[in-house]
Image: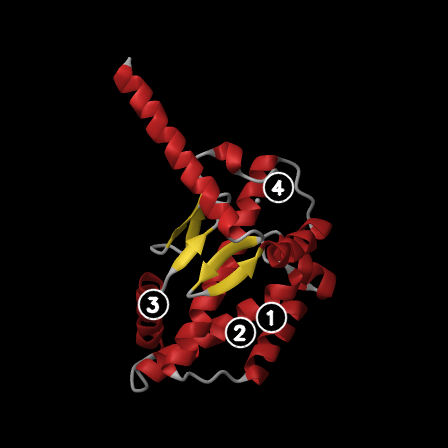
Amino acid sequence: MKKNSTKLLAIFLISFLLVGCSTQNPGTAAFVDGKRITVSELDVYLNELREIVPVETNDRGSTQIRTVLALIIIGEIIEKAKINTNAQVDQNLVAGDYQALEQDQGGKDALYLFAANRDVPPSLIYKVLEQNRMIEAIGQALAPNDTPADQSDEASAYILDLAEQIEISVNPRYGSWNSDNGSISPPANVLSEPAYAVNLELN
């Protein structure tokens, strides 16, 4: 009986510590290398998505929150990799990518729906396309004489290694960060999830 009581106390203490972590920085969804991602910032993107594709279940809403938050975190990692490698991105290429994708989808509204069905908010579509070009530029900076395929491999390896090195913390209410695949795992205690809490490719 005493052993069971000790086990229950340990579980209670772990739960208490998790709650404490999430309240030390109220309004914080995550930190990436010291940079704060706020809940209000996350909510803006979620509201954009849900205006286009309403969420019908709590499970779907929770998955969507984790996906969008992971998308934001990955963007911060890629941005840091770009700065570290002094990679240069031609914004004309990004604008061309956006225009081509919009035309392929049949216009702005169709593009927004296409992206929203992949949990990419409309205001992040350009950013995702820019990140694709960032990865390309990082590869060129790291291995200027290699083939595009090898440059892509170099960039991916560098970004994954960087994700392991920098400090990334997610509010336990949303789950925990996985640097291996750039995703957020559900929280251990599903009751801690918000009632309503990202696929990173547009193709």
Q: Mark 2 — residue?
A: 130
Q: Please state which of residues 161 and 154 is positioned toward the viewer in this rendering.
A: 161
Which disc is residue 162 wearing?
3
Q: Would you say residue 199 is visible in this rendering? A: no
CA–CA distance in space, label 3 to label 1: 23 Å
**The residue under label 1 is which amino acid type?**
Tyr
CA–CA distance in space, label 1 to label 2: 6 Å
Which badge, 4 or 3, comes first in the chain's sequence? 3
On the image, the x and y values in percent for residue 92 come to: 58, 84
Judging from the image, what secondary structure is the residue with disc 4 in?
loop
Q: Please state which of residues 48 and 33 is positioned toward the viewer in this rendering.
A: 33
In percent of the image, x 61 and y 78: which residue is there?
A: 95
**The residue under label 3 is which amino acid type?**
Leu
Relative height, residue 70 to residue 4 (above, below): below
In percent of the image, x 52 and y 32: which residue is there?
A: 191
Q: Mark 1 — residue?
A: 126
Judging from the image, what secondary structure is the residue with disc 1 in?
helix
Judging from the image, what secondary structure is the residue with disc 2 in?
helix
**The residue under label 4 is which amino acid type?**
Tyr
Contact? badges 4 and 2 (CB < 8 Å): no
Residue found at the very far top of the displayed protein:
1
Left or right placement of residue 56 versus residue 132 in this view: right
Q: Mark 4 — residue?
A: 196
